[in-house]
Each structure stands twice: as structure tokens, then as C-alpha cells.
Image: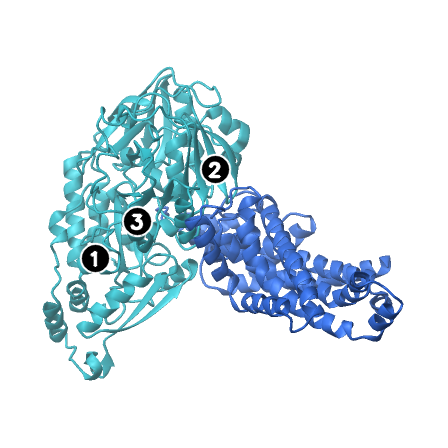
Chain colours: A blue, B cyan
Amino acid sequence: MTLFVVRRLGAAIPVVIGITLIAFVLVHVVPGDPAKVILYGANASPEQIATLRQQLGLDEPLWRQYADFAVNLLHGNLGTSFLTQNSVAYELLSRAPSTLILTASSMLVAVLVGIPLGLVAGMRPGSILDTVARWISFVGVAVPYFFLALLLVLVFSVRLHLLSAIDDGTAKSLVLPAVSLGWGYAAILTRLVRGRVIDEMRSDYVKSARARGSGEVRVLLRQVLRNSSVPAVTTIGLQFGNILTGAAITEVIFGRAGLGSFLATSITSKNIPVVQGAVVVIGIAYVVINLGVDLIVGAIDPRTRQEAAA
Amino acid sequence: MNHTLPGQITRRRLLGWGGGLAAGVGLAPMVTACGDDTSSAATSAGGGTLTMGINAAPDTLDPGATGLALTLLISFALFDPLVYWLPDGNGGAAFHPGLAESWTISPDASKYTFKLRKGVTFHDGTPFDAKAVKATYDHVVDPKTKSKSGLGALGPYKETKILDDYTVQIVFTAPNASFLHQQAAGNFGISSPAALAKYGPIGFGNNPVGTGPFTFQSYQPGSQLTLLKNPKYTWGPKALGDGPAKLDKLVFRIVTDDSGRYNALQSGQLQIAMNLPPNNISAAQKSGKYQQLLVPSIGTPLGMPINVTKPPTDDPMVRQAIMYAVDQDALVKNVLYDVYKPAHNVLTPITPGFSAAASKTYSYDPDKAGKLLDQAGWKAGDGGTRTKNGQKLNLEIILFSGGGLELPTQFVVSELQKVGFSSNTSVQPFATAQASFNSGVHNLGSFGYYGADPYLLNIWVNSNAIQSGFNWSHYANPAVDKLIAKANSTAADATRNGLYEQVGQKLMQDSMYLPLWDVAGAFTLSPKVRNLHQTLNGYLAFHSATLG
């Protein structure tokens, strides 16, 4: 098991290096000069712009800039933001909790809504409950989360004054962003779990469990849910990446200071150290989450553990 | 000249939606521009927390280091300049003693001597004296500070001489007539020398310590800045109110999304929303629930630099045709919900040196535009687009995203079509657009500027600013360069303004800029908010603000 974790982490290193390289190249391919962006409106002479370029290290050849970045990274140093002069690590750390909380609570919404709804619907396909669940998931998949977010704000904040339109640090102000971002994933989970439950309910071991006299609830939780959850967990893990993407837009809509909105603004201002740092952090988060998913799936389903170890 | 933000959200302010009500209709009484007696009207007892939604995150809280206009807004709450320069409520402006009680300027505008106020203390308890002034100005020019707008705004700084504990002389290596305006615009809020030493040139940006009406409490990056009342504040200018601030707490909440700010205003989480887009402003006004404030700024109106080197706009007649073809009044009325003031000049009317004559250079006259194009050899052809020697009369239009010109440009394009132009419009991220503008691949671009002094013209019309600066008209006129330099070395106001008026007229005659509407700060506020004051850069001062 330890070997498995070590190997997976080892494999992640070239992945992270690869994404920093791609991010570095992409951000340089886009025309524009960070020094000029920074000095826009500053009544700067060409000499001042040249000095700033030098200070920022932008006059160095590209390979040199990347090498500096990579060496610093190995020392755990992500560099200094062009815009604020604060360390990138500080800037990212101060925003990471907001994104983590949003991502986790959206996932919580997705799991708490999606799995029970899928279970209930799958147990009695064709029932009224099933029809309702299918409609909810249909709408969830069809309506983009940013549109849902705007609708929710309009109804619950602007009209009813029940919930906050922008983040104010309270759990209450997390409700709308978490629901709008989590809803679509809840819908995906509902469909997935429903399909699996329908299959499992027909399987031999369920029949035999029932024949042994197990109660319906026990059958559902011990047999059906456990077997249905492997694809669900894998999906949840994969969706984490999507949720991080969605978090960027959700953060902007709800005025949340998170990594996603920060990365977006840093790209448009060519704040290269921040873009690089954010890409590294998000890249590592991806790798870690995928690793976590593999481990959880292994715990649920011993068969995959053997395959992985092989 | 500093003030700007855009593309990256930050600089958006520069070309961002200004907007607001046409000059003070119904709100003039509320925002007392100056006037000693009106500001502290006997309204409520004061206290409370005022939260204002701003559209970008400050880059730093150190006004000397910042590159963003927004930090100057914050600077007004945390710091005092040596001398305040404030609107007088009648379209003019006046100087008021700040941390300096009086001042004198050498005839060549290269030496400024200030007599300082006694009995002032910084938020950290450090007493204010001449050393603080020297520390502040030396901090701005310290390369370690990496000052962005402050360094440019300061000009040819040589040194600050301490003549005695309460007298300083700021010396420039060359005449610098814009300095008194610049030092009042926010970049040069006097900073605590103890705090500068304690936190260092960069760290001060996270721990600002001034003498202003509010003290710094906390900043959550990208989220919110919280300031507390400074109970000792008694040295503010009378024009901004008397004694300490009335509010207990002033919060700047960063909400980059325009509709997010409007939603939060409606849900009651914000009491002031800054720079909403015109459609939201219009909706807010129709609802009858909010006050709307338009705070004019010194600067260059939002508009389109016309590239004087790229065909077909290298032909003055073609450029003049553009100037006659566009109806700014209709643009403001139809596209901007009438929340702005149409512009016909390279400077806004409150800018010193504004030339009323220059505003009359062109009027809306599409027939004349057509005749000019005829004269220039562009003949009406099939499909409405004029041609000459088989070439279509086509304009390349480049805008930067988030600059607020996307929709108005569609109106401009339709006006130009009526007289026989065709065009391609592309919207690029700020950094990309800037590269395009410097390389000159555009015929029309987008621009606009919040400044402190007419010397701001130097940044975007000077011939040395074409390749890497902000001269996106690619306008190279040594005579104009010299006139601007001469103006900035003239201490006498009337003479200096006269020179800037000449520059404005020349620039308009050369039709190198299509002005659209005046830059201004737009604030949509809850009716509870009272006793705000305007600044000359489109912002607000909270010295005597109350929540009714």
C-alpha cells in the first residue's frame, strides 16, 4: 500500500512539471508586457518601463526565467506577485481556504442530494418519486451553474432578503454558492446512482440476501449502496476538477476572494508568478485528489486494490 | 497622473464605467462639494458601519507605491496630504491646508516650501513633523518601494530639505508646476516614518499608517478592507467636516462582478456600490430606492484614439469625417441611459487648462463628414461602403475587454457606417490590446484617463510614448511636446492654463482623439448615506459621512 502511494506520488512529479511548463509557455505566448500593464497610467518613461522589466526579470531569456522559477519552486519559493509585491505563497494561502470551503460544500450538496435521490429513484423506477428525481436531475444537468446562481441571488437575496448576495464570511452566505455550484453535480450523481441501483437490485446477491431474510434497509445500505458507490466515488473525484473550474466563476458572481477568481484576474494582467504558482498548487491538488479517490475506491472494493498493486 | 485601472480588473477604472447622474440633479445638497457650514448638517448622531462595494482589489495599501487609482480612494480615508485640493461646488476647485498650514512656490516651480501643522500624531502615536514628510517622499523614490504611479506623478524629484522641525522644502531638478495638484491627489499621503522603518518599503503596503480620519484595522486580500474611526482626528480641512469621523467603521468590500455589486446593494449588504454599469444605474434610479452620484474627475474623457499613421486615418480629412460623423449626445442618451456627460474634448471640463473653444471644434454633422470623404477621394460605392482606387474605406477597431467601450463602440460603428465607413472590431485582453496599440495595427482604439493635472496629456500625446507608452494615436508633434513641457514649467496658473488650452485646441484640430463621454466616478447609494464629499479624481471622502 505504501509502495502504491509512493509510486503514485512519484508519477505526479512529471505531471506537475509538465503543467508548469505548459502554463509558462502559454502565458508568454500571449502578447503583452507585464511591465507596461503595471505602469499603465503611471506616467512612466520608456526608461522606467525598462527598469521595471529588469526588476521583474523579464529581460532574461525565456529558458532562464523558467529555470529560475523551477529552482525557486524546488526551494518551496513560489516567487513574488508582480502586482502586490507580496509573496505568491501568501497570496494563494490567503485565498485557498475560501476555495476549499466552497469546493467541499458544493461537493457536500452534490453528495447529500445526489446519492439519496438516486437511491430512492432507483429502488422504484417509474414511481412518482422517480419521476420527480429525474426531473430534478434533468434540470440540474441542463441549467448552467452560473445561470442558476444568478436566479438564486435574484430570488433569495434581492427579492426575499433571506440569504446574502455576496460572501460575508458567514456560513449563511455560503448557501447560495454551494447550492448553485453543487446542483449540477448532484444531478450527475443522481443519474449515476439511480442507474446502478436499478442494475444491482436485479442482481443475484441482492436476491439471495433477501432470501436470507435481510431487511430491505439492510440490503439497500450493505449490498446495493456499497456496490453502487464505486463509480460514484470515482465520479466525485473527477468532478472535483470541474468544481474547481466552476468555482472561479462562482467566486466572481458571489464576490468570494478565492483561488479561481484570483487566477482569472492574474491571467488577464499577466501576473506571471501568480499564474505559475496557482497552476502548481491546483495541479498538485488534482493529483492528490485523484490519489485519494484511488485509495478510497481501494478501500471500498478490494478488487481494485489488487489491480493497483500489480 | 496616475489613476487608472483596467483590463485586469484593476485598471478597469481607467476606462471603466464611470457613470452616474448628470451633474448633481437632486443630489447637490447631499454631497457638499466644499462649503464650510453645510457638511455637518444636524442629521443623525453618527456611528455605525458603512460598507462600500468596490470593483477591484487594491494592489497595495501604500499610496506611494500603488499603480491603481482605487488605492487613492482608500488613501483619502487613511492619510492626509500636505495640502488638500477639493472641488468648490461651482465647477472650480480650491486649496485647503492639510498637514501644511501654508506653502510657497518658487517662480520657476521647482521649489515648494511648506510650513507644517503642529500637534498632529500618526495612528501609531508617532508625532508628525518635517522628518515624516521627508520620509514619505524619500520612500516614494526609493527603488525598493517599486512605486508605480507615485513615481511618475512626483516628476523630477531631487530631495526634501528639512529647514526646521516644522518647515520642509521639496526640491525638483526641473520645473514641475503640476506638483501641488499631484501631492493632493492621494499618492502622497504623509506616512508614519516609524511604520515605514518598522515594516519596510514593501511591508508598509500591508500595514499602512497615516494621520487620516480612519485607521487601518485589517485587510483580507481580494476580499475586504476594514478601517476604524480615528478618534484623535481634529486636523482635517474644514471643507471636509469638523473633528473625527462620524462612522465607527468603514469597510471596502471587493466585488469585481458588476451585477454582484448591484445585487449586494439590493440585499442590503452594501450601502454604496461603485461604478455600476449604466443599465444597473438606470434600473436603480427607476426603482426610486437609491441615490445616484456622479463625481466628475480631472482627466481625459473615455473615447477612441485615432491612429494618425495607419491608412485610411493617416488622412486628416478622414479623421475629421469621423469627428463629424459621431453624435456623442445621442450615444450617451441611447446607449448609456443618460447617466454620463457627453465629451467633445481631450480633457474633462473640471481639468485646469480645459479649453471651451476646443470643445466646439466639431459638431455632429454627417453631411459634412460625407463631403470631407468625397474631397478625400472616397467615393460612395456598392453596399454603402466608400472606396478609393479599389480599396474599401475600412477601419480596424481594437478595444480592450472590460474597458466599458464594447457596447458604445457598436453605436460608433453604426454612425460611421452611415457616412460610408466599414469596420472590423476586435476585443482583446488588456495586455494584448496594449501591445496592439503600441504596434499601431488599429485605426481606432480605446482610452480614457483619471488624472490630477493637465500634465496628464504628456503621457498619451508625447511623441516618446508611441513605441512603449500610451500614445495610442501615434501622434508625433514636437511643437505640442514643447508646449506641454513649457506649461509644466510655468508656476503662474493663468499662464499655464492658457498654454494647456492651446494644446487642447491643437489636439482637437488634428483630430487624433474621438472623445465620447467624460470620465467620472459613479456611486449608487442607499438613501441613509449622507454627508459625503467629492474629490477631484472621481472619488469620495468619508471624513464626515453618516448613516442616517
Residue B82 located left or right of residue B389: right
In this view, B542 is above or below B517? above
The answer to whether residue A35 is left or right of residue B461 is right
Q: Gap in Å between the C-alphas at discs 1 and 2?
A: 36 Å
Residue B500 falls in image quadrant:
top left
Residue toward you, A25 or B282: B282
> Which of the numbered marks, if any, corresponds to residue B287?
3
Of the 4 image quadrants, the one containing the N terminus of chain B is top left
Front: mark 1 or 3: 3
The percent coordinates of residue B313 (x first, y second) are 23, 68
Q: Residue at x 39, y 32 (%)?
A: B77
Q: Which subunit holds the residue at mark 1?
A: B
Q: Of callouts 3 and 2, which one flags the residue occurring earlier in the amino acid sequence? A: 2
The numbered mark, 1 or 2, whose residue comes first in the sequence reads 2
Is the C-beta separation of discs 1 and 2 under 8 Å? no
Q: Examine the image and state in which quarter residue B473 appears.
A: bottom left
- In the image, residue B408 above or below residue B60: below
Relative depth, front residue between B525 and A34: B525
Specify few, some or many for label 2: CA neighbours under 10 Å numbering under 14, 14-19, or 20 or more. Answer: many
Element marked by disc 3: helix
Mark 1: amino acid: Lys
Q: Secondary structure at mark 2?
A: strand
| Residue at the image point whose x is 78% and y is 59% from the top | A296
Residue type marked 3: Ser
Give the residue pinned by disc 2: B225
Residue furthest out toward the right: A212
- In the rendering, at what x and y percent does residue B469 appear? 35, 54
Q: Is residue B124 above or below residue B412?
A: above
Front-most of B476 and A283?
A283
The mark found on residue B333 in the picture is: 1
The label nearer to you, 3 versus 2, is: 3
What's the amino acid at mark 2?
A: Leu
